[in-house]
Structures are given as structure tokens and as C-alpha cells.
Image (cartoon, rainbow, N blue to C red):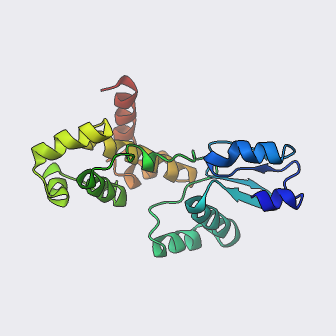
Amino acid sequence: MFLLGEAGLLTGVKCTTHHNLLDDLRDQHPSAQVEANRVFVDDGAILTSAGVTAGFDVILYWLAQRFGTEVSLQVARHMNVYFRRTSHDAALSPWLIARSHMHPAVHRVQDAIAAAPDAAHDLMTLAKIACVSSRHLTRVFKQHTGMTVHDYQIALRHALFEQWRAQGLSQEKAAIAAGFSSANAWRRSKNNESLGV
């Protein structure tokens, strides 16, 4: 990013970079229009990303623009990328929420849920993945993440729903693809979330 700025290619250009470097980029290249909390920014001829993994999102976005969504989805599957983020997604992804702890069993459960947030994950199966009892998993998951296992999965499903909507799916199809039984079930879940239920 900084090399683009040194080459004069960021003058008047909307761009982004890793959140730890945003202020440095603004200071060193004040003519650039630096945008915070974006996975990537498309300003015509120049695509910039918010970090290394966001580079995958840029590649998938570019492929979709040039060759169509189906090609991009095939590449995403081949790369084992769960879903593509859009340029409007926050750089600090919902997929990373509650992941700053150091508990390996909880991370194993979070990995399993993130790998298939649309799947039905019962507590007994997740406890086996964590190599702990269901009761212990319930306690340590809440202790280390600040949320229940169920709430974590629902948060990821809501993120997945938004991703599918951004890709052009109808509300009904996006809800089903995200693991809800229908758009009505998604709305009920969203209402419960906003009410803190």
C-alpha cells in the first residue's frame, strides 16, 4: 500500500490497509482517501485490502467481476474459504468475534461451528469435539467468549445471511442458506437478538 502511495498512485484514491496502519497511511499519504473498517476498497483501477487474509476476498471479488459469481464460488470452495466478504463488510469480521481467548477446547468448538454455521450443531457433538462434557463446555464457552454456544452460532448465521444477501440472494434463499428454516425464522431470530432475548 505504501509503495502505491510512494509511486503517486493513491492521490485522490479511496483505499484501505490493515487497521494498525491506517493512521500511518493517512500521515504519509494525506492525498489518499483512507477508509477505515473495510475489508477491501475498489476504486476503479486500484483495489486495496485491509490485510493478508482480506487479499483472498479481493481476489474472489475480482474473479466475480471478471468471470462471474460461479467461477468465484468454485475458487472459494477450492481454497476452503467459508464465504466471500464484500468491500462493505467490516474489517474486523463477525467470524473473529470472541476469538481472543486462549482456551483450545473452545477454539475447537468455534472452528467446528465456523466451518458449517448453517449446520445443526448439538451440544453433545460439540462437547465431543472439545473433549469435555456438555456441562463443562457450556460453562467454559460462556466464560471465555462472553456468549453461549447457541448465541455464537446464531451470530455467525446472521453474518452468513448478510453475506448471501450481499451476493444477491433473496431474503428467503439467504435465510435458508444461512441455516434458518425460513426468512420468518431469520426475522424472529433478528428480533430476539435486538431485544436481547
Quarter of the picture holding the C terminus: top left
- Which of these two is toward me, 180 or 16? 16
- The residue lying furthest to the top in this view is 195
Q: Position of residue 65 (x, y in %)?
A: 69, 65
Q: Left or right of 169: which side holds 55? A: right
> Foreground: 36 or 182?
36
Q: Position of residue 137 (x, y in %)?
A: 17, 46
Q: What is the x, y in percent for residue 92?
A: 53, 46
For the image shown, how many numbered marks are present on the structure?
0
Residue 131 in percent (x, y) is at 14, 58
Residue at left offset 26%, top offset 50%: 106
Q: Is residue 105 left or right of residue 37?
A: left
Residue drawn where x is 31% and y is 35% of the image:
146
Q: Is residue 18 above or below residue 37?
A: below
Q: Can residue 150 be spotted in the picture?
A: yes
The answer to whether residue 35 is visible is: no
Quarter occupied by the N terminus: bottom right
Q: Residue at x 85, y 43 (%)?
A: 30
When the figure is inspected, residue 7 is found, relative to residue 162, above or below; the finding is: below
Q: Is residue 61 left or right of residue 76?
A: right
Q: Residue at x 59, y 66 (%)?
A: 69
